[in-house]
Amino acid sequence: MLFQVEMTVEIPHGLAPDVVAQLKETERQRAQELQRSGQWRHLWRVAGRYANISIFDVESNEALHDILSTLPLFPFMRVSVTPLCRHPSSNRADDG
Amino acid sequence: MLFQVEMTVEIPHGLAPDVVAQLKETERQRAQELQRSGQWRHLWRVAGRYANISIFDVESNEALHDILSTLPLFPFMRVSVTPLCRHPSSNRADDG
Amino acid sequence: MLFQVEMTVEIPHGLAPDVVAQLKETERQRAQELQRSGQWRHLWRVAGRYANISIFDVESNEALHDILSTLPLFPFMRVSVTPLCRHPSSNRADDG
Amino acid sequence: MLFQVEMTVEIPHGLAPDVVAQLKETERQRAQELQRSGQWRHLWRVAGRYANISIFDVESNEALHDILSTLPLFPFMRVSVTPLCRHPSSNRADDG
Amino acid sequence: MLFQVEMTVEIPHGLAPDVVAQLKETERQRAQELQRSGQWRHLWRVAGRYANISIFDVESNEALHDILSTLPLFPFMRVSVTPLCRHPSSNRADDG
Amino acid sequence: MLFQVEMTVEIPHGLAPDVVAQLKETERQRAQELQRSGQWRHLWRVAGRYANISIFDVESNEALHDILSTLPLFPFMRVSVTPLCRHPSSNRADDG
Amino acid sequence: MLFQVEMTVEIPHGLAPDVVAQLKETERQRAQELQRSGQWRHLWRVAGRYANISIFDVESNEALHDILSTLPLFPFMRVSVTPLCRHPSSNRADDG
Amino acid sequence: MLFQVEMTVEIPHGLAPDVVAQLKETERQRAQELQRSGQWRHLWRVAGRYANISIFDVESNEALHDILSTLPLFPFMRVSVTPLCRHPSSNRADDG
Amino acid sequence: MLFQVEMTVEIPHGLAPDVVAQLKETERQRAQELQRSGQWRHLWRVAGRYANISIFDVESNEALHDILSTLPLFPFMRVSVTPLCRHPSSNRADDG
Amino acid sequence: MLFQVEMTVEIPHGLAPDVVAQLKETERQRAQELQRSGQWRHLWRVAGRYANISIFDVESNEALHDILSTLPLFPFMRVSVTPLCRHPSSNRADDG
């Protein structure tokens, strides 16, 4: 089941640089792990903003929430979720 | 070059049903043609709304505008465009 | 899988009264059918507005879209969809 | 009398972890107490956000305010309240 | 139980003047009837707009919806409802 | 002359509890004083939020500003002001 | 007593040109009459929009509403009203 | 003096095609005339929307309003105007 | 050339009282200086908010920016600027 | 390829003045460097706000993101990006 998720990251200015670096590195590792498992299907940077637009392929709303709410940067994100489904005009096998 | 495009369709209530049917059919054919050419890379329906979220892969802003502004349903759409780029944490070969 | 859906109905002023009455009656019948099948789990009127707040329990985003987009009043609705999941503090057996 | 309440929690980044943990535990206990008493009728997590959508069944606006304003996490919440009533198409005995 | 209600009236430009006049007259009569019964407790015009701000005193959300949704001008209104309760600093006997 | 005023209070989390308590007590006393003088004609709590909806009866815009801007909690409020006037359908002697 | 009023005019495209011309001419005459009486103290065009920003000097909210709601173009306007008062740093005799 | 202007065109669906074509042609001629005179300094299409972003170089707010309000498509535009001035970090001779 | 400017002041709660008092005093002096020079033509307090609505009469956008960006309270302001021009129905000599 | 970018700078009040001065100076140098290379084609100050409206001419979305996200003031900016393309009515050689 597919969801478009937009995550905007807002790290407080006072956070220590090494804490931020560590958060970003664990976030990167977690993102790659979830891409390998197939649940984080697409991941793009929004040009000009510290934000991404992603497509998740998960079994349920619960699975989506578990993934998002345990991301290392989750406490610093604004997140919007849009449920998607197969489009009748799509002719791409894996877009549904 | 990648763009996320969200199109929301609002067909006026007074439009004749056969005109609407014809518009939708030519729109469907055009969407499939653009998917085959690789320019309309992804196409999903937004659950519960007459809208889609799409990813376009085009050579330039001009190419994107030419495609969107000649869609048969364009006069009845609200369109928002978000330029994307490769995410440093992405490990998918074709997402950049 | 649960979704909160808010539907606001805006019927054009020019629509013939008997057409409207027929639409509302088929909408009512469809809503009851979907409640009996368990997919439209809750249905409340928003006080003071021609709108409802509903909880749907469906197998997938596709199932939700199929239900909403075939409602008789769908062409006259603004719809917002919020995916829900079980809350860790909930102690009600059927809320997840 | 029924109300939909959406609560979004925004805990300041500087709050001590044990204070936060204590707040969440007392919030959880209070939520379960109010579910057992029947006043907090439904409680769902919004997928992807630190937020919930709930249905309260209370005797009056005053009773609703007393419950919400004394929740342990209330100072950190944005709250929106929507008064609901029975929908004429509902066929569920306890939804009104 | 008290509710603040803001009603903004938008009558379509094409409506026949005598239909409009008749609607307004029946609206006026209904408003006075509901004031006499004590349910429409206060009624003020918003300066500079075709809108009112009102306070209703009703037994339930259902009672409020029944009143608002049967007003003659209801199909032409945007309505917002805010549930109120007694303020701890109020010293006016009839404001709770 | 009547004005609806909506005040939403947002006290910074770092303010010392005894300072907050003192501010609220002087606010309460000032609110009662202004009710006794007839200038703060109605005062209601908005259910579920740290906010009030009030009706002021003052001689001028200046008088309204003097009252609001000297409230003890004013530095922590978002305030919106709506000028009101007598409604032609009102039949209550003191609502104009 | 002073009010800033912003009026945005939206004339429906189907209105007959001579009706529009007549409305604008009577609007112009009424605006000049109210300027001569001193109640419409300032009147400026917003650059690039069919809108004006005005300052009214009236005795009460009622007087303001009577003036605005009887303007010939009122049925085609969106109006916003902001009550003003003398600024402590103003040194202009007639701005309060 | 420079202004950024964004114009979004919304032509009503019922307008006759030859009327629309004529409007667009006279709009195009007027735009080119104003570019030749140096007042319409830049003109770009917004990708994916029937809208433009332009830079005007005019002597006054009045001159800007005269230009915009006499464009053939002005009755069908939403217009936003942002006054610009030379940026201290600009090193381009003609951007001030 | 005329501009409406709305300035909303938001002073951080932690700023020392004597710093704030000094800022306000220099702001007051600067406002009076600019009124005497004729550039700050009108200055009104918005009733109920720490905000003003002003009319500036300056030679250019640059002159406006120089004035606003050097106000002592500028770092604590949200500012919105609306370019104005003479209204064809105005009959006041100095409003253009 | 052209993009309009609007950058609004919000420097936290607690940042040390010399740090701010250093950031602004390196920002200025970087802006001039990018103007000389032709990528930052236009740069204007928005009158009355600490913001700029710019036109970038870059090879791709990636190139735009690399430029914006490495600006010294980027962590303190809100950025909005609008992809542009040549307008059919433009007669300026370098606007496409």
Image (spheres, coloured by chain):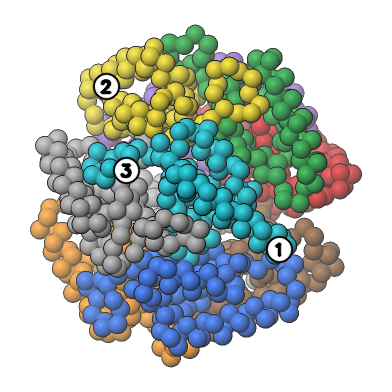
Chain colours: A green, B yellow, C purple, D red, F brown, G orange, I blue, J cyan
Amino acid at dot 1: Asp
Name the secondary structure under disc 2.
Answer: helix
- Evaluate whether label 1 is on the same chain as label 2: no
Residue B46 screen position, x and y as percent: 48, 25
Question: Residue J94 has which mark?
Answer: 3
Mark 1 in CB contact with mark 2 (< 8 angstroms): no
* Residues at marks 2 and 3, CA–CA distance in whole angstroms: 37 Å
> For the residues marked 1 and 2, what is the alpha-carbon distance in whole angstroms?
62 Å
Point out the frontmost of discs 1 and 2. Answer: 1
Residue A60 position, x and y percent, is 65, 19
- How far is disc 3 from disc 1 in space, using C-alphas? 40 Å
Decide which of tag 3 and tag 1 comes sooner along the chain: 1
User: Circle 2 sits on which residue?
Assistant: B23
Q: Is residue A23 above or below residue A37?
A: below
Classify mark 3: helix, strand or loop. Answer: loop
> Going by the image, does D72 lie left or right of C53?
right
Residue identified by numbered label 1: J18
Query: Would residue G11 be seen by someone viewing this image from the given angle?
Result: no
Could you tell me which chain the residue with mark 1 belongs to? J
Q: Is residue J28 found left or right of A15 in the rendered image?
A: left
Q: Can you say which quadrant of the picture contains the C terminus of chain D? A: top right
